[in-house]
């Protein structure tokens, strides 16, 4: 059966499952747009793009794909950084843009039911309208979708206080690789009745099934947020700052970035340098400044860190505009460096090991590839570092990727030695699957393969991602 016949049959199958006109795209622009994520190292080659508007349509697509042995790739906001949402082998891309409703808000439970296509910022705004707060936040919140966030267990800038996406998922509806609909946990706070299957789908990258509905928890909004940005000579100083502030203040965020990162943001965005003194590293701390006592404590800690030589200069936000500009120093980094096609490594270790871990990696990469510019930033309060290697303009993309693959092997050997993770929050996808053994044992991977076979016996759900099915 050729492509045109398969697409016609798919359209007929969807028409039977829905009262709405099926949305199937096969034009070249759509195949390119929906067939990839923010990574640009694989050429997308999907068969077609399907935009379902209901759970029944998703089930119909899965059953069709299973009957015809066609792979399915989930597509949300396409902001992923591990090539988990890339279709490279004639798969059908299932894009959830039309399943974007927010409903059934419960004021007592502080929960809301969302479609997988709900934009992260959409949920944040809805929560704000109810006088509440959805705390999972990151640079792509204006375009990333909730289904993708759940499937990658997205983290972001407030993990130190609020945790990862999985901490806010009260219940899920998922469609498995057989087309079966599972309703998991039902929004319960306590449910001690055996295996929590919901947790398998959170961070599963769509390899077990597709999230088609999520019951999300909300929280009280933080009050009087204030940002301190501090310049430090080295990473040991940054860690000392973290240790001392955490002892007396409940931080909502603790981020770091390098002078190279800040310089590029200032040049690209035109925001003012936060203070006059350039320093090798910067720490950005956020906390609720709800009283003069909290403000006084923050200033006392600031002064103490300067006396110890850990802080060379710094500034504390005095208004919302200044707070937003200070956050832009950190949040604009990914967008700013995107023009250099950065090779990203999203790695983690326990927080206490960060300084020597970063120094060792930085030394190896700088020694082996002195012409590569390295940009460091990350969520250091939870041990998550983002290593970005910028592609020189003169270097071919394929050659750059090949050289960075060698870098990754060295980096992940260090990760393994420190007992860390090769992927802290971006997932595994295609980019990291060859390195999964640096974090997971062969026994664990074999068990994961067995779990996939239970939920996806035909191997059609996001095939080839995370690991190869044996």
Image (cartoon, rainbow, N blue to C red):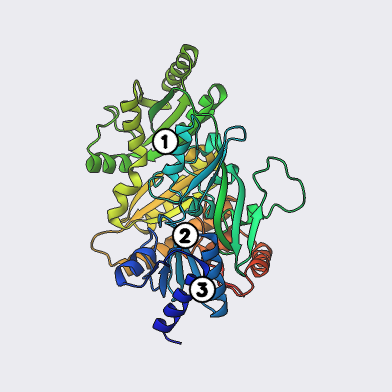
Q: Which quadrant is the C terminus positioned in?
A: bottom right
Could you say which disc has been placed on residue 67 in the image? none
Secondary structure category for the residue under label 3: loop
Real-space Cα separation, disc 2 to disc 1, in angstroms: 51 Å
How many angstroms separate mark 3 from mark 1 (CA)?
48 Å
**Residue 135 location in percent, x, y?**
50, 37
State how far apart marks 2 and 3 are (Cα): 20 Å
Q: Earlier in the sequence, mark 3 or mark 1?
A: 3
Percent x, y for residue 171?
A: 62, 48
Q: Is residue 399 visible?
A: no
User: Label 3 neighbourhood size at 10 Å, few (<14), some (14-19), many (20+)?
Assistant: many
Q: Which residue is mark 2?
A: 53
3 and 1 marks in contact (CB < 8 Å) = no
Q: Where residue 105 sits in the image (x, y, percent)?
A: 55, 39
Residue under label 3:
71
**What mark, if any, has residue 234 been given in the picture?**
1
Residue shown at the point (39%, 82%) measured from the top left: 4
- Asked if one can make out residue 261 in the rendered structure from this viewpoint, the answer is yes
Judged left or right of residue 467, residue 37 is left
Q: Residue 47 lies in what quarter of the image?
A: bottom left
- Tell me if residue 289 comes above or below residue 1 in the rendering: above
Q: Nearer the viewer, mark 3 or mark 1?
A: 3
User: In the figure, is residue 146 to the left or right of 110?
Assistant: left
Of the image marks 2 and 1, the number of the one nearer the N terminus: 2
């Amino acid at each position: 059966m050729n492509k045109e016949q398969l697409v016609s049959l798919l359209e007929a199958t969807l028409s039977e499952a829905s009262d709405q006109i099926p949305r199937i795209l096969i034009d070249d622009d759509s195949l390119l747009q929906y067939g990839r994520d923010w990574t640009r190292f694989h050429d997308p080659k999907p068969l077609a793009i399907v935009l379902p508007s209901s759970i029944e349509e998703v089930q119909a697509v899965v059953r069709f794909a299973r009957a015809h042995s066609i792979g399915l790739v989930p597509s949300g906001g396409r902001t992923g950084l591990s090539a988990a949402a890339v279709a490279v082998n004639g798969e059908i891309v299932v894009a959830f843009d039309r399943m974007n409703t927010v409903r059934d808000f419960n004021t007592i439970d502080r929960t809301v039911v969302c479609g997988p296509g709900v934009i992260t910022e959409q949920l944040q705004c809805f929560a704000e309208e109810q006088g509440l707060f959805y705390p999972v936040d990151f640079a792509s919140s204006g375009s990333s979708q909730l289904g993708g966030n759940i499937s990658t267990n997205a983290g972001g800038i407030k993990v130190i206080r609020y945790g990862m996406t999985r901490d806010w998922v009260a219940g899920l509806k998922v469609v498995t690789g057989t087309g079966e609909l599972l309703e998991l946990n039902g929004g319960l706070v306590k449910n001690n009745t055996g295996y929590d299957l919901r947790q398998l789908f959170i961070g599963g990258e769509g390899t077990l099934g597709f999230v088609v509905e999520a019951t999300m928890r909300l929280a009280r909004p933080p009050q009087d947020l204030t940002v301190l940005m501090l310049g430090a000579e080295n990473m040991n100083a940054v860690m000392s700052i973290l240790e001392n502030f955490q002892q007396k203040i409940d931080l909502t965020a603790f981020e770091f970035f390098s002078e190279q990162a800040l310089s590029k943001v200032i040049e690209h965005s035109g925001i003012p340098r936060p203070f006059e003194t350039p320093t090798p590293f910067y720490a950005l701390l956020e906390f609720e400044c709800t009283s003069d006592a909290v403000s006084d404590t923050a200033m006392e800690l600031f002064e103490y860190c300067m006396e110890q030589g850990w802080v060379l200069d710094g500034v504390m936000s005095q208004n919302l505009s200044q707070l937003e500009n200070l956050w832009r120093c950190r949040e604009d980094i990914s967008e700013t460096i995107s023009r250099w096609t950065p090779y990203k490594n999203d790695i983690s270790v326990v927080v206490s090991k960060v300084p020597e871990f970063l120094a060792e990696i930085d030394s190896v990469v700088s020694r082996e590839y002195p012409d590569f510019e390295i940009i460091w930033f990350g969520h250091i309060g939870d041990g998550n570092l983002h290593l970005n290697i910028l592609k020189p303009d003169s270097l071919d993309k394929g050659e750059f990727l090949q050289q960075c693959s060698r870098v990754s092997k060295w980096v992940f050997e260090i990760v393994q030695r420190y007992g860390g993770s090769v992927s802290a929050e971006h997932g595994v996808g295609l980019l990291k699957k060859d390195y999964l053994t640096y974090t997971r044992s062969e026994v664990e991977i074999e068990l994961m393969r067995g779990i996939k076979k239970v939920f996806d016996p035909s191997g059609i759900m996001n095939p080839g991602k995370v690991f190869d099915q044996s």
